[in-house]
């Protein structure tokens, strides 16, 4: 199954195509020229699925380190949750309370509702450094699609 759309075009169609794709197909997509568009689209969409009602008075900076880039480096994104809002940036500038490190394929699956963040964490595929209490709260702050 070829993934023909990017998440910025149609998040639900993208999520369904991810569900139908093999890990090899997802790896190929994420080591090719589409990686930046796919990851940026998923991260830019996080404020759209953010549940302010669940965040309460939370004030936190979270850095995502997405591994699996062809050159061996990580893509790093910053999420700032404060005042009931979630703001994302492709340029981390603040000191994070939590750093989450995950492979690109698992990141794509998790952010499209095709993998559970808590299970990825328990299996060691999502690693966390910093405020570990925030690890449990963090997935519940987002309403991911149900493909």
Image (tube, grey):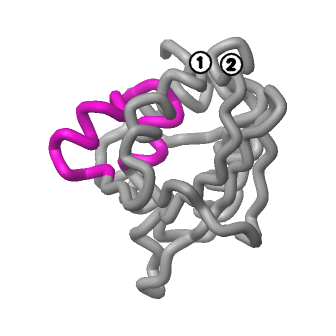
Q: Spot the residue most to the left.
A: 123
Q: Is residue 72 above or below residue 113?
A: below
Q: Which residue is mark 1?
A: 143
* Secondary element at tag 1: loop
- Please give the name of the residue rendered at 65% of the width and 24% of the height, measured from the top-left corner: 55
Q: Residue at x 35, y 31 (%)?
A: 115
Measure the C-alpha gap from mark 2 to mark 1: 7 Å
On the image, the x and y values in percent for residue 64 come to 54, 58
Q: Are marks 2 and 1 in contact (CB under 8 Å)?
A: yes
Q: In this rendered view, identify the residue nearer to me: 113 or 123.
A: 123
Q: Which residue is mark 2?
A: 51
Residue range in magenta is: 106-126
The answer to whether residue 47 is visible is yes
Image location (x, y in percent) of residue 77: 65, 61
Q: Quadrant of residue 68?
A: bottom left
> Which of the image's four quarters has the N terminus?
top left
81 vs 130, left or right, is right
Q: Is residue 90 left or right of residue 4?
A: right
């Amino acid at each position: 199954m070829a993934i023909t759309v990017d998440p910025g075009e149609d998040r639900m169609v993208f999520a369904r195509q991810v569900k139908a794709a093999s890990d090899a197909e997802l790896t190929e997509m994420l080591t090719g020229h589409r990686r930046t568009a796919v990851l940026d689209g998923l991260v830019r969409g996080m404020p759209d699925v953010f549940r302010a009602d669940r965040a309460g008075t939370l004030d936190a900076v979270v850095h995502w380190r997405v591994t699996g880039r062809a050159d061996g480096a990580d893509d790093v994104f910053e999420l700032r949750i404060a005042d009931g809002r979630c703001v994302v940036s492709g340029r981390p500038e603040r000191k994070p309370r939590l750093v989450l490190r995950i492979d690109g394929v698992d990141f794509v699956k998790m952010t499209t509702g095709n993998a559970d963040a808590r299970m990825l964490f328990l299996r060691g595929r999502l690693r966390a450094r910093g405020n570990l209490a925030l690890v449990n709260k963090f997935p519940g702050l987002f309403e991911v699609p149900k493909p």
